[in-house]
């Protein structure tokens, strides 16, 4: 079948999809859309303001998650698709050196807002090996026949290895086993569409019931607060899991290229967490993978009930980009020195280690900027747990300053009982 037949077939299937959606009732809308929080000085403000792309934290394997929502695409005459591609690459460029995950919400693509087939083909060519190598999973949510046609069009140029990364999610519930669902930014349109599909299929809307409250194990280290850990470990300020991972990485991983960038099997991570929570010894030599303790350290920070930098610090951190460059280090010191003593001691211990890692960047390729992109969201997040793409910039900037200027920011305050790597 020649290319024009494929394009016609794709158009036919998209029309069928629209008819199927019409059978579910009127198009789902979320009413008045929230005003964009994207700064007008953003290099891709014209695209970013639509909220098509979001970075939403990490998946269960510690990989950054980036979402693309078709329902946010405006009609073709209202958007420059070349700029859309540029914005997507601009976003991915911040993370493709690390393992990452993409989620594509297909609902909302229609004949009015879909890019041309030729644009899709040129876009695929633009994403060279740099983008594909570290993409570990592409979740396609609510796939339709149109997706199947596109797959047939691109199949001759898609490698078998890349094809294995593509996973189809019939509904949102399928995502729960792979991702931290409550951290995702899912448009209301997609949520309501998912509910309509479930009603049509006679499936009950899944309700995520909170597990019954129960006291943590006396030996538990993940998912409990710093004070609990201090009380259970003879008043030690630094949690044992941090002491062990940092000590191991300092001894054997400082010059490992891509430290903190690689992901590890979720089964291994869960196994290590289980050992820690049961008070069993963990020997990282048994795993023969330096990235295991690196992921465990990030996981520990991410699973703290409250962020290490505290919710109270979120607004001052967001304002860091409004501060004159020459005064930012001073502002960072002011924010950090307002932290509770325990948080300060743990943060100082961590940043001291990350400063060591950054000083070996000629070997490990992990500059303070690279480390900030990885650790920023693990140190601070909003109370509702849903970060915005624009909110990442000040978080990463603040974290980079902490690492780069560690001696200046932390030198003038000490806490009784604190230790350093």
Image (cartoon, rainbow, N blue to C red):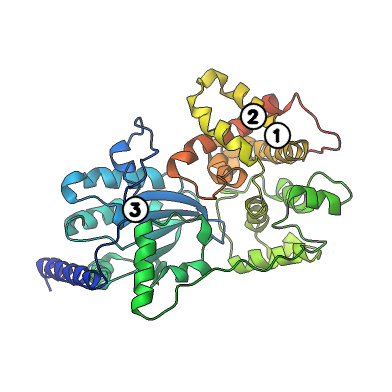
In the rendered image, the vertical position of residue 125 relative to residue 391, given as above or below: below
Question: From the viewer's perspective, is the residue at label 2 or at label 3 nearer?
Answer: 2
Q: CA distance from mark 1 to mark 3?
A: 44 Å
Kind of element beneath mark 1: loop
Residue picked out by circle 1: 339
Residue 36 lies in quadrant? top left
Pointers 1 and 2 in contact (C-beta within 8 Å): yes
Residue picked out by circle 2: 335
**Which mark identifies residue 153?**
none
Quadrant location of the C terminus in the rendered image: top right
Which residue lies at the image location 43% right of the left edge and 57% below the top edge?
Answer: 133
- Left or right of 46: which side holds 139? right
Q: Position of residue 228 (x, y in %)?
A: 79, 52
Kind of element beneath mark 2: helix
Q: Position of residue 163 (x, y in %)?
A: 37, 69
Residue extending farthest bottom: 202
Q: CA distance from mark 1 to mark 2?
A: 7 Å
**Which mark identifies residue 128?**
3
């Amino acid at each position: 079948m020649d290319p024009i037949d494929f394009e016609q077939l794709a158009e036919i299937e998209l029309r069928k999809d629209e008819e199927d959606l019409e059978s579910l009732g009127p198009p789902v809308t979320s009413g008045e859309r929230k005003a964009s929080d994207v700064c007008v000085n953003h290099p891709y403000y014209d695209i970013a303001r639509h909220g098509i792309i979001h970075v939403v934290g990490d998946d269960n394997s510690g990989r950054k998650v980036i979402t693309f929502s078709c329902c946010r695409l405006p009609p073709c005459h209202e958007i420059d698709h070349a700029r859309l591609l540029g914005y997507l690459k601009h976003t991915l460029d911040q993370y493709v050196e690390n393992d990452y995950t993409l989620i594509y919400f297909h609902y909302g693509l229609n004949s009015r807002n879909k890019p041309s087939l030729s644009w899709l083909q040129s876009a695929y060519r633009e994403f060279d090996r740099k983008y594909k190598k570290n993409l570990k999973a592409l979740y396609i949510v609510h796939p339709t026949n149109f997706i199947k046609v596109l797959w047939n069009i691109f199949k001759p140029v898609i490698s078998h290895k890349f094809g294995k990364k593509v996973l189809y999610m019939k509904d949102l519930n399928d995502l729960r086993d792979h991702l931290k669902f409550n951290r995702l930014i899912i448009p209301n349109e997609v949520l309501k569409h998912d509910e309509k599909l479930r009603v049509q299929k006679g499936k009950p809307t899944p309700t995520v019931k909170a597990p019954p409250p129960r006291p943590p194990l006396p030996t538990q280290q993940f998912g409990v607060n710093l004070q609990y850990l201090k009380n259970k470990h003879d008043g030690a300020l630094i949690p044992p899991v941090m002491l062990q991972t940092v000590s191991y990485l300092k001894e054997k991983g400082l010059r490992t290229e891509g430290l903190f960038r690689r992901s590890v099997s979720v089964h291994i991570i869960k196994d290590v967490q289980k050992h820690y929570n049961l008070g069993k010894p963990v020997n990282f030599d048994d795993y023969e993978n330096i990235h295991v303790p690196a992921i465990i350290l990030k996981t520990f920070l991410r699973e703290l009930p409250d962020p290490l930098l505290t919710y109270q610090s979120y607004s001052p951190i967001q304002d860091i980009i409004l501060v004159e460059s020459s005064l930012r280090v001073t502002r960072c010191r002011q924010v950090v020195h307002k932290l509770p003593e325990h948080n300060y001691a743990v943060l100082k211990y961590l940043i001291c280690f990350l400063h060591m890692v950054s000083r070996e960047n000629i070997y490990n390729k992990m500059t303070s900027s690279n480390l900030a992109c990885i650790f920023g969201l693990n140190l601070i997040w909003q109370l509702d747990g849903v970060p915005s793409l624009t909110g990442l910039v000040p978080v990463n900037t603040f974290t980079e300053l902490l690492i780069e200027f560690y001696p200046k920011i932390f030198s003038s305050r000490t806490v009784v009982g604190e230790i350093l790597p």
